[in-house]
Image: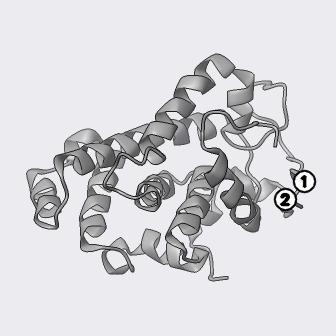
Amino acid sequence: MAHIPDRMESGQSTNVDRHHDDGGGKLPSPKFSAHIELGNNLPGIRGPMAYSPETARPLNELAEVLLRDDDNTLSRGERELIATYTSYLNDCFFCQNVHGSLAQHYLECDMPTLDAIKLHPETGPISPKLKALLPIAAAVQKGGKNVTEAMIAKARSEGATDREIHDTVLIAAAFCMYNRYVDGLATWAPEDRQFYIDRAPRRAAEGYIDYDLYK
């Protein structure tokens, strides 16, 4: 596996054991506590979602529409990649690996390829349209007003539709929220990236709404 860039090595994930899912849902044990008592030992966003199911439902419904609805000219893999890239820029280890593994699953590539795209999307093995959309996501990650007319014009010149530009902005904005939810409560994340890769096929099949947070 390629070296993980520094941005992906930072954060609280360095405080957890290196284990991965054995196929039966086994999780590593965290070595620190979240900022609040969540009442569970679940990693990443799963912990706060189990703590607050009333807010978990609409958050997952939004993710389902944004990332899995097939009434969209951006593929599931492309949309997961936008989520992954935004999470990478926000230095959210859990989200960038969950959604990076899903992007890898859908796009049928490996993790080093995903890492290369995150580091240098302009030269990565993705479509010219996606190369034009990812800078829009990056601009949203910094703040919505950083999106420029030139970025929009470039995306349109590469064939992006208004709906695709809209969804890119909304995915990036939503994942800034998800990332800050995960890290703002100091949740933990399995450090072994194979954990996320192993879970991706099941997560892709289950979707975001009705899956069991404890599996």
Q: Secondary structure at mark 1?
A: loop
Give how far across and how far down residue 62 sits, in percent. 47, 33
Residue in the picture at 42% in, 48% down:
70
Residue in the picture at 59% in, 66% down:
105
Neighbourhood count class around disc 2 (C-alpha, 10 Å): few under 14, some 14–19, many 20 upward? some
Total labels drawn: 2
Q: Looking at this rendering, what residue extends furthest in the front direction?
A: 71
Give how far across and how far down residue 140 sits, in percent. 31, 46
Q: Is residue 83 among what the camera can see?
A: yes
Q: Quick one: 208 or 114, which is closer to the camera? A: 208
The residue pinned by badge 1 equals 24
Q: Is residue 176 among what the camera can see?
A: no
Q: Would you place residue 36 above or below residue 143 in this image?
A: above
Kind of residue at badge 2? Asp
Residue in the picture at 9% in, 58% down:
153
Q: Secondary structure at mark 2?
A: loop
Give how far across and how far down residue 60 sits, in percent. 56, 33
Kind of residue at badge 1? Gly
The residue pinned by badge 2 equals 21
Neighbourhood count class around disc 1 (C-alpha, 10 Å): few under 14, some 14–19, many 20 upward? few
Q: Say which quadrant the N terminus sits in.
A: bottom right
- Estimate the spatial distance between the alpha carbons at disc 2 and disc 1, rounded to whole Å: 7 Å
**129 relative to 36 in the view: left or right:** left
The color scheme shown is one colour
Say if mark 2 contacts mark 1, CB within 8 Å.
yes
Disc nearest the viewer among 2 and 1: 1
Residue in the picture at 78% in, 26% down:
38
Q: Say which quadrant the C terminus sits in.
A: top right
Q: Quick one: 144 or 75, which is closer to the camera? A: 75
Q: Would you place residue 148 above or below residue 198 in this image?
A: above
On residue 69, the disc is: none
